Image (cartoon, rainbow, N blue to C red):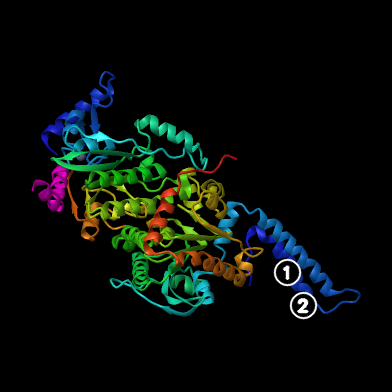
Amino acid sequence: MRHFLDFEKPIAELESKIDELRRMSEPEGMNIADEVERLNEKVERQLRQIYAKLTPWQKTQVARHPDRPKAGDYIRALITEFTPLAGDRAFADDAAVLSGLGRFRGRSVVVLGTEKGSDTESRVKHNFGMARPEGYRKARRMMALAGRFGLPILSFVDTAGAFPGIEAEARGQAEAIARSIEACLEAPVPMVASIIGEGGSGGAIALAASDCVLMLEHAIYSVISPEGCASILWRDASQAPVAAEALRLTAEDLKRLKLVDRVIAEPLGGAHRDPESAIQAVGDAIAEALGPLLALDSTTLKARRREKFLEMGREGLAQR
Amino acid sequence: MNWLTEYVRPRIRTLLGRREIPDNLWIQCPACEQMIFQRELEKHLKVCPHCGHHMRARAEERLRWTFDPGYGLIELPKVPLDPLRFRDSKRYADRLREAREKTKLEDAILVGHGTIEGAKSVIAAMEFEFMGGSMGAAVGEGILAAAKLAVLQEAPLIVFTASGGARMQEGAISLMQMPRTVIATRLVKEAGLPFIVVLTDPTTGGVTASFAMLGDIHIAEPGALIGFAGARVIEQTVREKLPEGFQRAEYLLEHGILDMVVPRGELRSTLARLIRLLCTQKVESEAA
Ligand SMILES: [Zn+2]
Protein backbone atom coordinates (compact mmCIF):
# COMPACT_ATOMS: atom_id res chain seq x y z
CA MET A 1 0.00 0.00 0.00
CA ARG A 2 1.15 3.43 -0.87
CA HIS A 3 2.00 5.77 1.99
CA PHE A 4 0.69 9.33 1.66
CA LEU A 5 1.95 12.35 3.53
CA ASP A 6 -0.53 14.80 5.05
CA PHE A 7 -0.14 17.37 2.33
CA GLU A 8 -0.55 14.66 -0.31
CA LYS A 9 -4.18 14.04 0.80
CA PRO A 10 -5.74 15.50 -2.37
CA ILE A 11 -3.55 13.13 -4.39
CA ALA A 12 -4.55 10.19 -2.23
CA GLU A 13 -8.22 10.96 -2.80
CA LEU A 14 -7.85 11.29 -6.55
CA GLU A 15 -5.87 8.09 -6.80
CA SER A 16 -8.33 6.09 -4.76
CA LYS A 17 -11.03 7.35 -7.12
CA ILE A 18 -8.94 6.16 -10.05
CA ASP A 19 -8.50 2.75 -8.45
CA GLU A 20 -12.22 2.53 -7.86
CA LEU A 21 -12.97 3.38 -11.48
CA ARG A 22 -10.53 0.80 -12.71
CA ARG A 23 -12.23 -1.89 -10.61
CA MET A 24 -15.66 -0.97 -11.98
CA SER A 25 -17.12 -2.79 -14.91
CA GLU A 26 -17.87 -0.51 -17.82
CA PRO A 27 -21.11 1.29 -16.95
CA GLU A 28 -23.54 2.43 -19.62
CA GLY A 29 -22.75 5.68 -21.37
CA MET A 30 -19.44 6.23 -19.58
CA ASN A 31 -15.97 5.82 -20.91
CA ILE A 32 -13.82 4.73 -17.98
CA ALA A 33 -10.55 5.13 -19.85
CA ASP A 34 -11.38 8.78 -20.56
CA GLU A 35 -12.36 9.42 -16.99
CA VAL A 36 -9.15 7.78 -15.66
CA GLU A 37 -7.13 9.83 -18.08
CA ARG A 38 -8.86 13.00 -16.91
CA LEU A 39 -8.21 12.16 -13.25
CA ASN A 40 -4.60 11.26 -13.94
CA GLU A 41 -4.07 14.64 -15.51
CA LYS A 42 -5.62 16.19 -12.45
CA VAL A 43 -3.23 14.20 -10.22
CA GLU A 44 -0.31 15.46 -12.23
CA ARG A 45 -1.50 19.06 -12.02
CA GLN A 46 -1.99 18.77 -8.27
CA LEU A 47 1.41 17.15 -7.76
CA ARG A 48 3.03 19.86 -9.79
CA GLN A 49 1.30 22.48 -7.67
CA ILE A 50 2.08 20.87 -4.32
CA TYR A 51 5.67 19.92 -5.10
CA ALA A 52 6.55 23.25 -6.66
CA LYS A 53 6.26 24.97 -3.30
CA LEU A 54 7.00 22.46 -0.59
CA THR A 55 7.89 24.08 2.71
CA PRO A 56 11.14 23.01 4.39
CA TRP A 57 9.10 20.99 6.88
CA GLN A 58 7.20 19.25 4.07
CA LYS A 59 10.53 18.49 2.42
CA THR A 60 11.66 16.98 5.72
CA GLN A 61 8.66 14.63 5.49
CA VAL A 62 9.49 13.77 1.87
CA ALA A 63 13.16 13.20 2.74
CA ARG A 64 12.04 10.72 5.43
CA HIS A 65 9.29 9.12 3.35
CA PRO A 66 9.18 5.36 4.04
CA ASP A 67 8.90 4.57 0.31
CA ARG A 68 11.78 6.81 -0.67
CA PRO A 69 14.59 4.79 -2.26
CA LYS A 70 17.29 3.94 0.28
CA ALA A 71 21.05 3.60 -0.07
CA GLY A 72 20.73 -0.12 -0.75
CA ASP A 73 18.29 0.57 -3.60
CA TYR A 74 20.81 2.90 -5.22
CA ILE A 75 23.59 0.37 -4.83
CA ARG A 76 21.47 -2.43 -6.31
CA ALA A 77 20.49 -0.33 -9.30
CA LEU A 78 23.71 1.56 -10.00
CA ILE A 79 26.49 -0.81 -8.95
CA THR A 80 27.19 -4.05 -10.76
CA GLU A 81 29.23 -6.89 -9.25
CA PHE A 82 28.60 -5.34 -5.86
CA THR A 83 30.72 -7.17 -3.34
CA PRO A 84 29.91 -6.16 0.24
CA LEU A 85 32.85 -5.95 2.60
CA ALA A 86 32.30 -6.03 6.34
CA GLY A 87 33.78 -5.02 9.64
CA ASP A 88 36.00 -2.46 11.28
CA ARG A 89 38.68 -5.07 12.12
CA ALA A 90 38.43 -4.12 15.76
CA PHE A 91 35.02 -4.71 17.23
CA ALA A 92 32.10 -5.42 14.91
CA ASP A 93 30.39 -4.97 11.61
CA ASP A 94 27.89 -2.12 11.67
CA ALA A 95 24.96 -2.82 9.36
CA ALA A 96 23.94 0.86 9.40
CA VAL A 97 26.80 1.45 6.97
CA LEU A 98 26.79 -0.48 3.71
CA SER A 99 30.19 -0.83 2.12
CA GLY A 100 31.99 -2.74 -0.53
CA LEU A 101 33.48 -2.92 -3.99
CA GLY A 102 31.64 -2.87 -7.28
CA ARG A 103 31.42 -1.30 -10.69
CA PHE A 104 29.78 1.99 -11.47
CA ARG A 105 29.15 2.20 -15.21
CA GLY A 106 32.00 -0.18 -15.82
CA ARG A 107 34.50 1.44 -13.46
CA SER A 108 35.66 -0.28 -10.29
CA VAL A 109 34.71 1.81 -7.22
CA VAL A 110 34.41 1.71 -3.44
CA VAL A 111 30.84 2.22 -2.28
CA LEU A 112 29.59 3.52 1.07
CA GLY A 113 26.04 4.18 2.20
CA THR A 114 24.00 4.72 5.33
CA GLU A 115 21.02 2.41 5.13
CA LYS A 116 17.78 3.11 7.00
CA GLY A 117 15.98 -0.08 6.03
CA SER A 118 12.53 -0.31 4.48
CA ASP A 119 10.47 -2.52 6.78
CA THR A 120 10.47 -3.18 10.50
CA GLU A 121 12.87 -6.07 10.26
CA SER A 122 15.42 -4.34 8.05
CA ARG A 123 15.10 -1.07 9.97
CA VAL A 124 16.07 -2.84 13.17
CA LYS A 125 18.88 -4.67 11.38
CA HIS A 126 20.33 -1.41 10.04
CA ASN A 127 19.64 0.47 13.30
CA PHE A 128 17.43 2.91 11.35
CA GLY A 129 20.48 4.18 9.51
CA MET A 130 22.18 5.46 12.65
CA ALA A 131 25.78 4.28 12.64
CA ARG A 132 27.88 3.36 15.63
CA PRO A 133 31.64 4.01 15.82
CA GLU A 134 32.26 0.71 14.01
CA GLY A 135 30.34 2.01 11.01
CA TYR A 136 32.55 5.07 10.65
CA ARG A 137 35.67 2.99 11.29
CA LYS A 138 34.60 0.58 8.56
CA ALA A 139 34.04 3.56 6.24
CA ARG A 140 37.51 4.80 7.03
CA ARG A 141 38.95 1.39 6.25
CA MET A 142 37.11 1.36 2.92
CA MET A 143 38.41 4.81 2.05
CA ALA A 144 41.94 3.65 2.80
CA LEU A 145 41.35 0.65 0.54
CA ALA A 146 40.12 2.96 -2.21
CA GLY A 147 43.23 5.08 -1.85
CA ARG A 148 45.53 2.07 -2.03
CA PHE A 149 44.03 0.83 -5.27
CA GLY A 150 43.16 4.17 -6.84
CA LEU A 151 39.42 3.55 -6.82
CA PRO A 152 36.92 6.43 -6.73
CA ILE A 153 34.64 6.52 -3.70
CA LEU A 154 30.87 6.89 -4.01
CA SER A 155 28.80 7.49 -0.91
CA PHE A 156 25.03 7.55 -0.44
CA VAL A 157 24.00 9.47 2.64
CA ASP A 158 20.66 8.94 4.34
CA THR A 159 20.78 9.12 8.11
CA ALA A 160 19.10 10.93 10.97
CA GLY A 161 22.56 11.10 12.51
CA ALA A 162 25.13 9.03 14.36
CA PHE A 163 23.62 6.69 16.95
CA PRO A 164 23.33 8.31 20.38
CA GLY A 165 23.98 5.33 22.66
CA ILE A 166 25.91 4.45 25.78
CA GLU A 167 28.20 1.94 24.08
CA ALA A 168 28.66 4.20 21.07
CA GLU A 169 30.01 6.89 23.39
CA ALA A 170 32.16 4.40 25.32
CA ARG A 171 33.75 3.22 22.08
CA GLY A 172 34.53 6.73 20.88
CA GLN A 173 31.71 7.84 18.59
CA ALA A 174 33.19 11.33 18.34
CA GLU A 175 36.66 10.07 17.44
CA ALA A 176 35.23 7.68 14.86
CA ILE A 177 33.33 10.48 13.15
CA ALA A 178 36.31 12.85 13.24
CA ARG A 179 38.56 10.18 11.69
CA SER A 180 36.00 9.43 9.01
CA ILE A 181 35.79 13.13 8.06
CA GLU A 182 39.59 13.17 7.95
CA ALA A 183 39.61 10.10 5.71
CA CYS A 184 37.23 11.79 3.26
CA LEU A 185 39.40 14.91 3.16
CA GLU A 186 42.63 12.96 2.80
CA ALA A 187 41.49 10.44 0.19
CA PRO A 188 43.93 10.49 -2.75
CA VAL A 189 41.07 9.50 -5.07
CA PRO A 190 37.92 11.27 -6.28
CA MET A 191 34.95 11.07 -3.95
CA VAL A 192 31.37 11.89 -4.84
CA ALA A 193 28.77 11.98 -2.05
CA SER A 194 25.04 11.96 -2.72
CA ILE A 195 22.61 13.18 -0.07
CA ILE A 196 19.62 11.06 -1.04
CA GLY A 197 17.31 11.54 1.95
CA GLU A 198 18.30 12.86 5.34
CA GLY A 199 21.75 14.35 5.81
CA GLY A 200 21.79 14.35 9.59
CA SER A 201 24.61 16.27 11.22
CA GLY A 202 28.00 14.71 12.07
CA GLY A 203 26.78 11.27 11.04
CA ALA A 204 26.27 12.61 7.51
CA ILE A 205 29.34 14.81 7.07
CA ALA A 206 31.43 11.81 8.17
CA LEU A 207 30.70 10.34 4.72
CA ALA A 208 30.29 13.56 2.76
CA ALA A 209 33.41 15.73 3.10
CA SER A 210 34.01 14.99 -0.57
CA ASP A 211 35.11 16.57 -3.87
CA CYS A 212 31.57 16.78 -5.06
CA VAL A 213 28.40 16.73 -2.96
CA LEU A 214 25.20 16.02 -4.86
CA MET A 215 21.86 16.53 -3.21
CA LEU A 216 18.44 15.40 -4.29
CA GLU A 217 15.88 18.17 -4.69
CA HIS A 218 13.77 17.17 -1.68
CA ALA A 219 16.54 15.82 0.52
CA ILE A 220 17.56 17.73 3.65
CA TYR A 221 20.99 18.34 5.13
CA SER A 222 21.27 19.91 8.54
CA VAL A 223 23.38 20.38 11.62
CA ILE A 224 20.48 19.23 13.80
CA SER A 225 17.02 17.81 13.17
CA PRO A 226 14.23 20.40 13.08
CA GLU A 227 12.70 18.65 16.11
CA GLY A 228 15.96 18.80 18.06
CA CYS A 229 16.54 22.42 17.14
CA ALA A 230 12.97 23.36 18.10
CA SER A 231 13.18 21.66 21.47
CA ILE A 232 16.43 23.47 22.29
CA LEU A 233 15.88 26.95 20.84
CA TRP A 234 12.08 27.17 21.04
CA ARG A 235 11.84 24.78 24.03
CA ASP A 236 9.00 23.12 22.16
CA ALA A 237 9.46 20.25 19.68
CA SER A 238 6.14 21.13 18.03
CA GLN A 239 7.87 24.21 16.59
CA ALA A 240 9.82 21.87 14.27
CA PRO A 241 8.21 23.33 11.11
CA VAL A 242 9.43 26.80 12.12
CA ALA A 243 12.88 25.44 12.95
CA ALA A 244 13.03 23.62 9.60
CA GLU A 245 12.45 26.96 7.91
CA ALA A 246 15.08 28.77 9.99
CA LEU A 247 17.78 26.10 9.55
CA ARG A 248 17.90 26.46 5.74
CA LEU A 249 18.17 22.74 5.31
CA THR A 250 16.78 22.42 1.78
CA ALA A 251 18.87 21.58 -1.28
CA GLU A 252 18.01 24.94 -2.80
CA ASP A 253 19.29 26.89 0.23
CA LEU A 254 22.41 24.76 0.61
CA LYS A 255 23.26 25.25 -3.04
CA ARG A 256 22.81 28.98 -2.64
CA LEU A 257 25.13 28.89 0.38
CA LYS A 258 27.60 26.89 -1.74
CA LEU A 259 27.65 24.06 0.79
CA VAL A 260 26.58 21.48 -1.81
CA ASP A 261 27.75 21.36 -5.41
CA ARG A 262 24.70 20.30 -7.35
CA VAL A 263 20.99 19.74 -6.83
CA ILE A 264 19.44 16.78 -8.65
CA ALA A 265 15.81 17.24 -9.74
CA GLU A 266 13.42 14.56 -8.49
CA PRO A 267 10.63 12.96 -10.46
CA LEU A 268 7.25 14.67 -10.16
CA GLY A 269 5.85 14.02 -6.69
CA GLY A 270 9.21 13.09 -5.18
CA ALA A 271 11.59 10.15 -5.44
CA HIS A 272 9.10 7.87 -3.67
CA ARG A 273 6.63 8.13 -6.57
CA ASP A 274 9.16 6.99 -9.11
CA PRO A 275 12.23 5.48 -7.41
CA GLU A 276 13.66 4.14 -10.65
CA SER A 277 13.89 7.56 -12.34
CA ALA A 278 15.23 9.15 -9.17
CA ILE A 279 17.99 6.54 -8.94
CA GLN A 280 18.85 6.96 -12.61
CA ALA A 281 19.02 10.75 -12.23
CA VAL A 282 21.44 10.33 -9.32
CA GLY A 283 23.49 7.85 -11.37
CA ASP A 284 23.74 10.32 -14.25
CA ALA A 285 24.75 13.13 -11.93
CA ILE A 286 27.44 10.96 -10.31
CA ALA A 287 28.83 10.06 -13.72
CA GLU A 288 28.94 13.73 -14.72
CA ALA A 289 30.61 14.73 -11.46
CA LEU A 290 33.12 11.90 -11.54
CA GLY A 291 34.29 12.49 -15.12
CA PRO A 292 36.36 15.65 -14.60
CA LEU A 293 37.61 14.47 -11.19
CA LEU A 294 39.15 11.35 -12.71
CA ALA A 295 41.46 13.54 -14.76
CA LEU A 296 43.04 15.11 -11.66
CA ASP A 297 46.09 13.75 -9.84
CA SER A 298 45.81 13.10 -6.12
CA THR A 299 47.70 16.22 -5.03
CA THR A 300 45.44 18.48 -7.07
CA LEU A 301 42.34 16.62 -5.90
CA LYS A 302 43.19 17.01 -2.23
CA ALA A 303 44.18 20.65 -2.60
CA ARG A 304 40.95 21.48 -4.44
CA ARG A 305 38.86 19.59 -1.90
CA ARG A 306 40.44 21.49 0.97
CA GLU A 307 40.05 24.79 -0.81
CA LYS A 308 36.38 24.08 -1.40
CA PHE A 309 35.70 23.45 2.30
CA LEU A 310 37.86 26.36 3.39
CA GLU A 311 35.77 28.71 1.25
CA MET A 312 32.52 27.57 2.86
CA GLY A 313 30.70 29.97 5.15
CA ARG A 314 32.74 32.95 4.05
CA GLU A 315 29.59 34.37 2.56
CA GLY A 316 26.01 34.20 3.78
CA LEU A 317 22.76 34.24 1.86
CA ALA A 318 22.58 37.14 -0.57
CA GLN A 319 20.25 39.94 0.50
CA ARG A 320 16.78 39.33 -0.75
CA MET B 1 33.84 18.86 56.36
CA ASN B 2 36.46 20.79 58.29
CA TRP B 3 36.06 23.12 61.19
CA LEU B 4 36.88 26.19 59.17
CA THR B 5 34.08 25.78 56.70
CA GLU B 6 31.63 24.80 59.40
CA TYR B 7 32.47 27.95 61.20
CA VAL B 8 32.73 30.26 58.24
CA ARG B 9 29.70 29.29 56.20
CA PRO B 10 26.82 30.67 58.23
CA ARG B 11 28.71 33.89 58.73
CA ILE B 12 29.21 34.32 55.00
CA ARG B 13 25.53 33.86 54.40
CA THR B 14 24.62 36.63 56.79
CA LEU B 15 27.24 38.84 55.26
CA LEU B 16 25.95 38.16 51.79
CA GLY B 17 22.50 39.12 52.88
CA ARG B 18 23.77 42.62 53.44
CA ARG B 19 24.47 44.89 50.52
CA GLU B 20 27.88 46.34 51.29
CA ILE B 21 29.72 43.18 50.15
CA PRO B 22 30.18 43.03 46.37
CA ASP B 23 28.37 40.04 44.87
CA ASN B 24 31.51 38.62 43.38
CA LEU B 25 33.63 38.58 46.50
CA TRP B 26 32.48 35.13 47.57
CA ILE B 27 31.77 32.28 45.21
CA GLN B 28 29.81 29.19 46.02
CA CYS B 29 31.28 25.91 44.78
CA PRO B 30 28.62 24.25 42.60
CA ALA B 31 29.88 20.82 43.70
CA CYS B 32 30.29 21.04 47.49
CA GLU B 33 28.29 24.27 47.91
CA GLN B 34 30.91 25.74 50.18
CA MET B 35 31.69 29.42 49.97
CA ILE B 36 35.11 30.38 48.68
CA PHE B 37 36.75 33.77 48.90
CA GLN B 38 37.15 35.08 45.36
CA ARG B 39 40.85 35.82 45.76
CA GLU B 40 41.45 32.34 47.18
CA LEU B 41 39.64 30.82 44.20
CA GLU B 42 41.73 32.83 41.73
CA LYS B 43 44.88 31.63 43.46
CA HIS B 44 43.70 28.03 42.96
CA LEU B 45 42.93 28.63 39.26
CA LYS B 46 39.20 28.31 39.95
CA VAL B 47 39.56 24.88 41.52
CA CYS B 48 37.59 24.52 44.73
CA PRO B 49 40.09 24.32 47.62
CA HIS B 50 37.57 22.24 49.58
CA CYS B 51 36.57 19.51 47.15
CA GLY B 52 38.85 19.94 44.12
CA HIS B 53 35.96 20.69 41.76
CA HIS B 54 37.20 22.36 38.58
CA MET B 55 34.97 25.31 37.82
CA ARG B 56 34.59 26.49 34.26
CA ALA B 57 37.24 28.94 33.17
CA ARG B 58 37.25 31.79 30.69
CA ALA B 59 39.28 31.68 27.48
CA GLU B 60 41.29 34.63 28.71
CA GLU B 61 42.19 32.75 31.90
CA ARG B 62 43.34 29.71 29.92
CA LEU B 63 45.88 31.81 28.07
CA ARG B 64 46.99 33.66 31.18
CA TRP B 65 47.34 30.46 33.24
CA THR B 66 49.25 28.60 30.54
CA PHE B 67 51.58 31.09 28.87
CA ASP B 68 54.60 32.74 30.42
CA PRO B 69 53.98 36.47 30.94
CA GLY B 70 54.22 38.57 27.80
CA TYR B 71 52.07 36.58 25.38
CA GLY B 72 50.06 38.20 22.59
CA LEU B 73 46.58 37.75 21.12
CA ILE B 74 45.94 37.69 17.40
CA GLU B 75 43.04 39.28 15.62
CA LEU B 76 40.77 36.67 14.08
CA PRO B 77 39.24 36.79 10.59
CA LYS B 78 35.81 38.38 10.34
CA VAL B 79 32.91 36.20 9.24
CA PRO B 80 29.49 37.18 7.88
CA LEU B 81 27.18 38.26 10.67
CA ASP B 82 24.09 36.04 10.90
CA PRO B 83 24.56 34.35 7.49
CA LEU B 84 21.13 32.66 7.52
CA ARG B 85 19.21 35.60 9.04
CA PHE B 86 18.18 33.16 11.74
CA ARG B 87 15.48 33.91 14.23
CA ASP B 88 14.02 31.86 17.05
CA SER B 89 12.49 33.68 20.02
CA LYS B 90 15.24 36.21 19.37
CA ARG B 91 17.21 37.21 16.33
CA TYR B 92 20.61 35.56 16.09
CA ALA B 93 22.09 38.98 15.33
CA ASP B 94 20.78 40.19 18.71
CA ARG B 95 22.04 37.11 20.53
CA LEU B 96 25.46 37.74 19.06
CA ARG B 97 25.40 41.35 20.13
CA GLU B 98 24.43 40.38 23.68
CA ALA B 99 27.10 37.70 23.87
CA ARG B 100 29.69 40.19 22.68
CA GLU B 101 28.65 42.70 25.31
CA LYS B 102 28.64 40.08 28.05
CA THR B 103 32.01 38.51 27.22
CA LYS B 104 33.83 41.41 25.55
CA LEU B 105 34.81 38.91 22.87
CA GLU B 106 33.97 38.78 19.17
CA ASP B 107 33.01 35.11 19.34
CA ALA B 108 33.62 31.92 21.32
CA ILE B 109 37.37 31.68 20.77
CA LEU B 110 40.63 33.44 21.60
CA VAL B 111 43.97 32.73 19.95
CA GLY B 112 47.28 33.71 21.46
CA HIS B 113 50.96 33.05 20.97
CA GLY B 114 53.80 33.09 23.43
CA THR B 115 55.93 30.67 25.42
CA ILE B 116 55.16 27.98 27.98
CA GLU B 117 58.11 27.52 30.34
CA GLY B 118 60.15 29.01 27.54
CA ALA B 119 58.77 26.79 24.76
CA LYS B 120 57.15 28.70 21.92
CA SER B 121 53.47 27.78 21.46
CA VAL B 122 50.17 28.83 20.00
CA ILE B 123 47.03 28.41 22.08
CA ALA B 124 43.41 28.57 20.94
CA ALA B 125 40.98 28.69 23.85
CA MET B 126 37.23 28.35 23.52
CA GLU B 127 34.89 30.54 25.55
CA PHE B 128 31.90 28.69 26.98
CA GLU B 129 30.32 31.94 28.18
CA PHE B 130 29.88 32.97 24.55
CA MET B 131 26.72 31.15 23.44
CA GLY B 132 27.83 27.92 25.11
CA GLY B 133 31.09 27.84 23.19
CA SER B 134 29.12 26.81 20.13
CA MET B 135 31.04 26.41 16.88
CA GLY B 136 30.02 28.55 13.96
CA ALA B 137 32.08 30.07 11.19
CA ALA B 138 33.96 32.37 13.61
CA VAL B 139 35.18 29.49 15.77
CA GLY B 140 36.11 27.55 12.63
CA GLU B 141 38.11 30.51 11.35
CA GLY B 142 39.71 30.86 14.79
CA ILE B 143 40.92 27.25 14.79
CA LEU B 144 42.19 27.66 11.23
CA ALA B 145 43.96 30.90 12.10
CA ALA B 146 45.57 29.24 15.13
CA ALA B 147 46.75 26.34 12.96
CA LYS B 148 48.20 28.67 10.34
CA LEU B 149 49.94 30.72 13.03
CA ALA B 150 51.42 27.55 14.56
CA VAL B 151 52.77 26.52 11.15
CA LEU B 152 54.13 30.00 10.51
CA GLN B 153 55.87 30.14 13.88
CA GLU B 154 56.86 26.45 13.80
CA ALA B 155 55.18 26.13 17.18
CA PRO B 156 52.96 23.43 18.67
CA LEU B 157 49.23 24.10 18.68
CA ILE B 158 47.32 23.65 21.92
CA VAL B 159 43.55 23.92 21.91
CA PHE B 160 41.44 24.25 25.06
CA THR B 161 37.98 23.08 24.11
CA ALA B 162 34.74 24.10 25.85
CA SER B 163 31.67 23.77 23.72
CA GLY B 164 28.09 22.64 23.74
CA GLY B 165 28.49 21.74 20.06
CA ALA B 166 27.34 23.35 16.86
CA ARG B 167 26.07 26.92 16.50
CA MET B 168 22.58 25.94 15.39
CA GLN B 169 21.82 29.47 14.27
CA GLU B 170 24.33 28.99 11.45
CA GLY B 171 22.69 25.78 10.22
CA ALA B 172 24.77 23.72 7.82
CA ILE B 173 27.49 26.39 7.86
CA SER B 174 28.22 25.33 11.43
CA LEU B 175 28.22 21.67 10.32
CA MET B 176 30.86 22.51 7.72
CA GLN B 177 33.16 23.74 10.47
CA MET B 178 33.75 20.08 11.26
CA PRO B 179 35.67 19.36 8.01
CA ARG B 180 37.17 22.85 8.10
CA THR B 181 38.68 22.38 11.55
CA VAL B 182 39.82 18.88 10.59
CA ILE B 183 41.77 20.54 7.77
CA ALA B 184 43.32 22.84 10.41
CA THR B 185 44.63 19.79 12.32
CA ARG B 186 46.12 18.45 9.08
CA LEU B 187 48.03 21.69 8.48
CA VAL B 188 49.69 21.43 11.89
CA LYS B 189 50.48 17.73 11.55
CA GLU B 190 51.85 18.07 8.02
CA ALA B 191 54.26 20.70 9.33
CA GLY B 192 55.54 18.11 11.82
CA LEU B 193 54.22 20.04 14.80
CA PRO B 194 52.41 18.70 17.85
CA PHE B 195 48.69 19.24 18.15
CA ILE B 196 47.60 18.91 21.75
CA VAL B 197 43.98 19.05 22.85
CA VAL B 198 42.95 19.95 26.38
CA LEU B 199 39.31 18.99 26.80
CA THR B 200 37.57 21.03 29.46
CA ASP B 201 34.07 20.99 30.86
CA PRO B 202 31.96 20.65 28.76
CA THR B 203 33.05 19.51 25.30
CA THR B 204 30.30 17.88 23.26
CA GLY B 205 28.77 17.55 19.80
CA GLY B 206 30.44 18.79 16.65
CA VAL B 207 33.56 20.05 18.40
CA THR B 208 34.27 16.66 19.94
CA ALA B 209 33.52 14.91 16.65
CA SER B 210 36.05 16.98 14.71
CA PHE B 211 39.32 18.65 15.74
CA ALA B 212 38.99 17.85 19.46
CA MET B 213 39.41 14.11 18.84
CA LEU B 214 42.31 14.44 16.40
CA GLY B 215 45.03 15.52 18.80
CA ASP B 216 48.42 13.88 18.98
CA ILE B 217 47.71 13.98 22.68
CA HIS B 218 44.37 14.25 24.46
CA ILE B 219 44.37 15.73 27.95
CA ALA B 220 41.26 16.43 30.00
CA GLU B 221 40.58 18.20 33.24
CA PRO B 222 39.17 16.13 36.10
CA GLY B 223 35.42 15.65 35.95
CA ALA B 224 35.04 17.34 32.57
CA LEU B 225 31.97 16.28 30.60
CA ILE B 226 33.12 15.07 27.19
CA GLY B 227 31.01 13.29 24.60
CA PHE B 228 29.32 13.33 21.25
CA ALA B 229 25.62 13.02 22.01
CA GLY B 230 23.89 14.77 24.90
CA ALA B 231 22.98 12.68 27.94
CA ARG B 232 19.27 13.47 27.57
CA VAL B 233 19.19 12.39 23.93
CA ILE B 234 20.95 9.13 24.81
CA GLU B 235 18.55 8.43 27.69
CA GLN B 236 15.56 9.05 25.44
CA THR B 237 16.98 6.82 22.71
CA VAL B 238 18.14 3.81 24.70
CA ARG B 239 15.67 4.17 27.59
CA GLU B 240 18.31 3.12 30.07
CA LYS B 241 19.84 4.82 33.04
CA LEU B 242 23.27 6.17 32.21
CA PRO B 243 26.16 4.57 34.07
CA GLU B 244 27.88 6.38 36.95
CA GLY B 245 30.43 8.90 35.71
CA PHE B 246 29.26 8.49 32.10
CA GLN B 247 30.98 10.87 29.65
CA ARG B 248 33.23 12.25 32.37
CA ALA B 249 36.98 12.63 31.81
CA GLU B 250 37.82 9.63 34.01
CA TYR B 251 35.31 7.46 32.09
CA LEU B 252 36.90 8.47 28.78
CA LEU B 253 40.37 7.76 30.13
CA GLU B 254 39.23 4.29 31.15
CA HIS B 255 37.77 3.73 27.67
CA GLY B 256 40.99 4.66 25.91
CA ILE B 257 39.82 7.95 24.45
CA LEU B 258 42.18 10.19 26.44
CA ASP B 259 45.88 10.05 27.19
CA MET B 260 45.57 11.59 30.61
CA VAL B 261 43.45 13.46 33.09
CA VAL B 262 45.45 16.34 34.54
CA PRO B 263 44.41 18.66 37.38
CA ARG B 264 44.41 22.30 36.38
CA GLY B 265 47.31 23.19 38.65
CA GLU B 266 49.57 20.76 36.77
CA LEU B 267 48.43 21.58 33.25
CA ARG B 268 51.02 24.20 32.43
CA SER B 269 53.99 22.09 33.50
CA THR B 270 52.53 19.01 31.80
CA LEU B 271 52.09 20.87 28.51
CA ALA B 272 55.61 22.27 28.72
CA ARG B 273 57.04 18.81 29.40
CA LEU B 274 55.11 17.24 26.52
CA ILE B 275 56.32 19.92 24.13
CA ARG B 276 59.92 19.44 25.25
CA LEU B 277 59.63 15.67 24.87
CA LEU B 278 57.95 15.82 21.47
CA CYS B 279 60.09 18.54 19.96
CA THR B 280 63.54 17.23 20.92
CA GLN B 281 64.75 17.24 17.33
CA LYS B 282 63.88 20.87 16.90
CA VAL B 283 65.28 21.91 20.27
CA GLU B 284 68.48 19.94 19.74
CA SER B 285 69.07 21.28 16.25
CA GLU B 286 68.46 24.81 17.49
CA ALA B 287 70.97 24.24 20.30
CA ALA B 288 73.57 22.84 17.88
ZN1 LIG C 1 33.89 22.43 46.21
As drawn, the residue found furthest toward the right would be A29
- Which one is in front, A308 or B274? A308
Q: In which quarter of the image is residue B264?
A: top left
Please tell me whether mark 2 sits on a helix, a strand or a loop.
helix
The amino acid marked with disc number 1 is Ser
Tell me where the magenta segment starts and ends, as one range.
Answer: B265-288
Predominant secondary structure, magenta span: helix
Residue corresponding to mark 2:
A23
Q: Which chain's residue wears label 2?
A: A
Residue corresponding to mark 1:
A16
Q: In this view, does A130 lie to the left or right of B160?
A: right
Q: Where is residue A239 in the image (x, y as percent from the top left)?
A: 54, 47
| Inter-mark Cα distance, 2 to 1 | 11 Å
Q: Where is residue A183 in the image (x, y as percent from the top left)?
A: 35, 62
Q: Can residue B217 be seen in this view?
A: yes
Residue A41 numbered mark, or none:
none
Q: Is residue B281 left or right of residue A96?
A: left
Whether residue A73 appears in magenta in the rendering, the answer is no
Whether residue B272 appears in magenta in the rendering, the answer is yes
Residue name at image x 40 percent, y 66 percent: A189
- Which one is in front, A269 or B285? B285
Q: Which chain's residue wears label 1?
A: A
Whether residues under marks 2 and 1 lie with C-beta atoms below 8 angstroms apart, the answer is no
Depicted A310 relative to depicted A25: above or below: above
Pointer 1 local density, CA inside 10 Å: few below 14, some 14–19, many at least 20 = few
Please state the quadrant of the image where ligand 1 appears. top left
Q: Is residue B8 left or right of residue A265?
A: left
